[in-house]
Image (tube, helix red, strand yellow):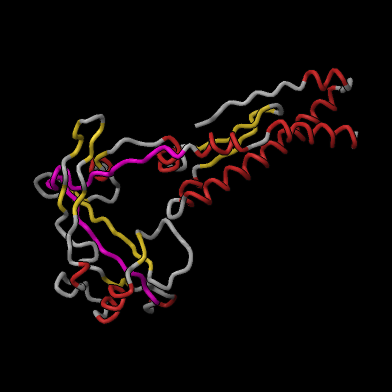
C-alpha cells in the first residue's frame, strides 16, 4: 500500500543554477526531510490509534530508496498481513481456512485435521501492551487461577459474572446476512491455566496464563468467523498531516544557506 507524491524541483534548480552534484545533494536533503516528517506523522497516528496490534502493524512498515530521486514508504504483506488488513480494511472471513493449512495442525487418522489455538492473557498488574496477549485478566479471575495451583479453571469455579458463554452477533453487509449469530460453547476464561515458564536448568519460572480452544474440520461452520477490519488509512492521514510545502521551503533555505 503506497500513496504516490511527485515533487518537481526544476524551477528551484534553474533559478539557482545548481550543478549536477548540487542537484543530487539537494534531492537527498529534501527526501530525507520529507521521510523524517512523514514518518513522524505516521507513527503518531499508529501510537494514537493502535494498542495490541501496534507492534504487528509496525512490523509491516517499510522504507526503500530504489534510486537517488525516489523514496518509497508503505506497508507490506510480506512482513505482516495484519498490517495491510489494518491499513486497507478486510471483509469478514472464516479463520478456519487459514487454520486448515497451518504447519501446526494435526492430521486425524482416517482423514480430517485439528489444531489447538492458544490465547494468552496478561495479569492485572501488567504494564504496557503486547500483541502476544489476548487481553488483561480481571482481578477476580486472576485470583481464582492463582488458587487453582496450575490446574485449569472449570466453569463452576469461575465467578458467576464470568460464566456466560456469550455470542457473536450476526454479520451483515448491504442488508444481507453474511454470517448468522453464533453462540459460543465455552466461557471466555473456562480452562484458564497457569503455564510455567521454564528457566535455565529446567526449573519452573513465573509462568503465564492461557486458555486453549480446539478447532477442526468438524467445527461448526460459523464458530471461527472473524468480523474483519475497518480501514484505518494511517498512510493517507499521515500524508494529509505532513506539511510538504513547509518541508520543501525549509529544505531550500537550508540548502542555499549552506551552499
Indicate yes or no whether the magenta region holds residue 91: no
Q: Residue furthest front?
A: 175
| Quadrant, the C terminus | top right
Q: Residue furthest left?
A: 110
Q: For this rendering, which residue is in front, 76 or 86?
A: 86
- Quarter of the image where one finds residue 139: bottom left
Q: For this rendering, which residue is in front, 53 or 60?
A: 53
Q: Is residue 49 left or right of residue 7?
A: left
Residue 51, compared with residue 179, is above or below; it is below
Residue 101, compared with residue 31, is above or below; it is below
Q: Is residue 237 left or right of residue 200?
A: right
Residue 162, compared with residue 18, is above or below; it is below
Q: Position of residue 209 (x, y in %)?
A: 32, 69
Residue 174, compared with residue 75, is above or below; it is above
Residue found at x 52% / y 51%: 48
Q: Position of residue 116 (x, y in %)?
A: 23, 56
Which span is picked out in magenta?
A: 206-232
Residue found at x 66% / y 38%: 35
Q: For this rendering, which residue is in front, 199 or 75?
A: 75
Residue found at x 27% / y 38%: 93
Amino acid at each position: 500500500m503506497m500513496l504516490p507524491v511527485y515533487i518537481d524541483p526544476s524551477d528551484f534548480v534553474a533559478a539557482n543554477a545548481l550543478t549536477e552534484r548540487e542537484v543530487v545533494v539537494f534531492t537527498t536533503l529534501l527526501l530525507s526531510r520529507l521521510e523524517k516528517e512523514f514518518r513522524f506523522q505516521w507513527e503518531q497516528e499508529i501510537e494514537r490509534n493502535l494498542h495490541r496490534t501496534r507492534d504487528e502493524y509496525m512490523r509491516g512498515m517499510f522504507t526503500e530508496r530504489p534510486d537517488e530521486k525516489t523514496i518509497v514508504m508503505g506497508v507490506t504483506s510480506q512482513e505482516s498481513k495484519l498490517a495491510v488488513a489494518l491499513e486497507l480494511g478486510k471483509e469478514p472471513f472464516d479463520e478456519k481456512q487459514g487454520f486448515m493449512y497451518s504447519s501446526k495442525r494435526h492430521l486425524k487418522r482416517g482423514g480430517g485435521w485439528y489444531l489447538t489455538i492458544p490465547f494468552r492473557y496478561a495479569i492485572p498488574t501488567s504494564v504496557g501492551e503486547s500483541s502476544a496477549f489476548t487481553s488483561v485478566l480481571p482481578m477476580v479471575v486472576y485470583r481464582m487461577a492463582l488458587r487453582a495451583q496450575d490446574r485449569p479453571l472449570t466453569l463452576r469455579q469461575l465467578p458467576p459474572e464470568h460464566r456466560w458463554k456469550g455470542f457473536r452477533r450476526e454479520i451483515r453487509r448491504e442488508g444481507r446476512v453474511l454470517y448468522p449469530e453464533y453462540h459460543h460453547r465455552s466461557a471466555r476464561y473456562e480452562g484458564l491455566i497457569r503455564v510455567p515458564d521454564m528457566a535455565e536448568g529446567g526449573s519452573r519460572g513465573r509462568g503465564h496464563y492461557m486458555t486453549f480452544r480446539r478447532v477442526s474440520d468438524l467445527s461448526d461452520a460459523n464458530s471461527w468467523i472473524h468480523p474483519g477490519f475497518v480501514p484505518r488509512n494511517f498512510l493517507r492521514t499521515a500524508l494529509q498531516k505532513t506539511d510538504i510545502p513547509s518541508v520543501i521551503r525549509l529544505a531550500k533555505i537550508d540548502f542555499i544557506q549552506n551552499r
